[in-house]
Image (cartoon, coloured by chain):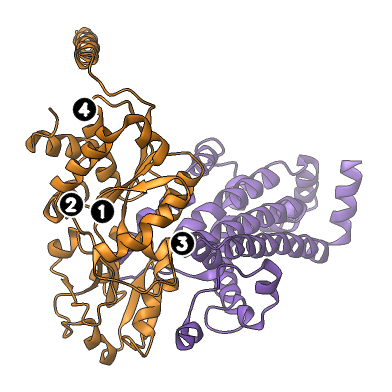
Chain colours: A purple, B orange
Amino acid sequence: MSVVVVLQAAVPRDIGLFEWLLDGDTWTGRAGILSSLLDTVILCGAVMATAIVLTVPLATALAHYRKGELTLTWFVTLSRAIPTFAVAGLLVPIALKRGWGFEPWPIFLALLLLALPPIYLNTYTAVRQVDQGAVDAARAMGFRERDVLFRVELALAMTVVLTGIRVAAVQVVATEPIRAFLGGDGLGRYVRDGLGQNNDTLVVGGAILVAALAATTGLAFALLERVVLPNGIRRLQSTQTR
Amino acid sequence: MTKKIVLLLAGLMMASLLVAACGDDDGDDPEGPTIRVRGQAFSESVTIAEVYAQYLQAKGYDVEVLTAAGFRTEAIDALQNDDVDLIIDYIGGALSALAPDAGPSADPDEIVETIAPLYEEFGTTLLDYSPAVDGDAFVVRGDSEASTISDVASLNYVLGASAACFERPQCFIGFTDPEIYGIEFADEVTIEFGPLLGEALAAEEVDAVIWNTTAPQIDANGFKVLEDDQGLFPAQNIAPIVRTSVLDEYGDQLKDDLNALSEAISTEDLLAWNNETDIELRESDDVAAEWLEDEGLLD
């Protein structure tokens, strides 16, 4: 019987939460937290990079030229109502039939759909609502249209744009674990295995890990906002809010 | 005009329901508490629960069908917490859930001997098992060289199975145990139990999946079930488990009725039901009603 125990892939059901979290094997190895974390971070990073590249320039340009204010904004807001799990779940059989496999397309597209709306809406609204006086002054000083767009409008809108990116990133990180229920792994695997194996420690531990990563992501982006925003903009923000 | 027809139809339906409801009340209905039945969250279990529930309803029992949820663990929890009164489960699965240390057995009577007292411990009674079996199945694509599970040892296969399989001695642990099958898989993929297993196998994402013998997709996709040459899989006859207090209130009548129904269900029936629900995409309650009607069990 001892051989069976050594080979046992599953975490014992009666293990305590701290016992599990503090065990070295929990962190390293093929199904370890570190490699699962890496899987999750890579996917979320790719989703966020794609979302930013697709959305920020488009929303900035549209807001600058005052185009698509009602139609596109309405459409994007509506797309927030589509449940991510449903999108990914529908895409999985399609991807399998086409030979693309379980990963990464279904979950990537579903998460991308989740990331687009907050970034788009924040960027559009922020650029659209930049103080018209500043824009007029820039034009009067002889700024070219491109400089008005990048050096005035986008620069002044940056705080809100970054907030949109932060919100999207936290949502993506917190939602990515559904991937474990759709033939993938990532940080959601512990919740999935815990539910399937009736192991509460795994469910709670996995949920804590996901929540911790989401919280860390939010903090990291908040720090990033402090670092990348010029002092002038931050002072402007603080005087405006005062 | 359409509206009037719809109203008329709705009225007719209500009227017929009333007539039907009154018609049932012929005075010799069994007296006792409402029997709450719940299936597990996969189509076969839902259909089985419907068959038992509609059968009891036709016999005049007061039955409530709860929305199917969870799997075996949740079903046993619900029995223990007094949330349901009747579940129908697979005896081999119940064995691994209630007595994880007991070795697998292919003999249903031997399994019943082990699990019946365990059910009694929390106030429930295991009734006679049915000849209908839905066993575990090691499924591969039709073009696989293997014909027994032992053959897989040399094939470096990727295994797809549900999370539950990976912790069960009668499943993944048994396949990899050198004293039983000693298979080293190239990789393991955790897949939600159900049709997704077949889709992953067909898409060659995995080379083998752990499924159940009555999955209609196995035939439909030309997959094959490998022989369990080391006898790892337990006997998986279906059997009803009833809260003992409910059983006592109804006396022997409920027990005899349920045993008669279990006796009437065969493995072929399970396959046919699954084909109706999973391939033809019909509703479980319709499939159950039709079968009961055909078997003449609704009198």
- Please give the residue where the numbered disc 1 appears in the rendered image: B238
Q: Is residue A155 visible?
A: yes
Foreground tag (1 vs 2):
1
Residues at marks 3 and 2, CA–CA distance in whole angstroms: 24 Å
Foreground tag (4 vs 2):
4
* Chain identifier of the residue bearing label 4 in the image: B
SS class, disc 2: helix
Residues at marks 3 and 1, CA–CA distance in whole angstroms: 21 Å
SS class, disc 1: strand
Q: Earlier in the sequence, mark 1 or mark 2?
A: 1
What is the x, y in percent for residue A7? 47, 85
* Chain identifier of the residue bearing label 2 in the image: B
Q: Is residue A88 visible?
A: no
Label 1 Cα crowd, 10 Å radius (few <14 / some 14-19 / many 20+): many
Nearest the viewer among A114 and B297 is: B297
Q: Earlier in the sequence, mark 4 or mark 2?
A: 4
Tag 3: amino acid: Gly
Q: Residue at x 28, y 24 (%)?
A: B30
- Please give the residue where the numbered disc 2 appears in the rendered image: B270
Q: Is residue B167 left or right of residue B201?
A: right
Asked if both marks, 1 and 4, belong to the same chain, the answer given is yes
Q: The N terminus of chain B appears in which quarter of the rendering?
A: top left
- Please give the residue where the numbered disc 3 appears in the rendered image: A196
- Please give the residue where the numbered disc 4 appears in the rendered image: B59
Tag 2: amino acid: Leu
Residues at marks 4 and 2, CA–CA distance in whole angstroms: 22 Å
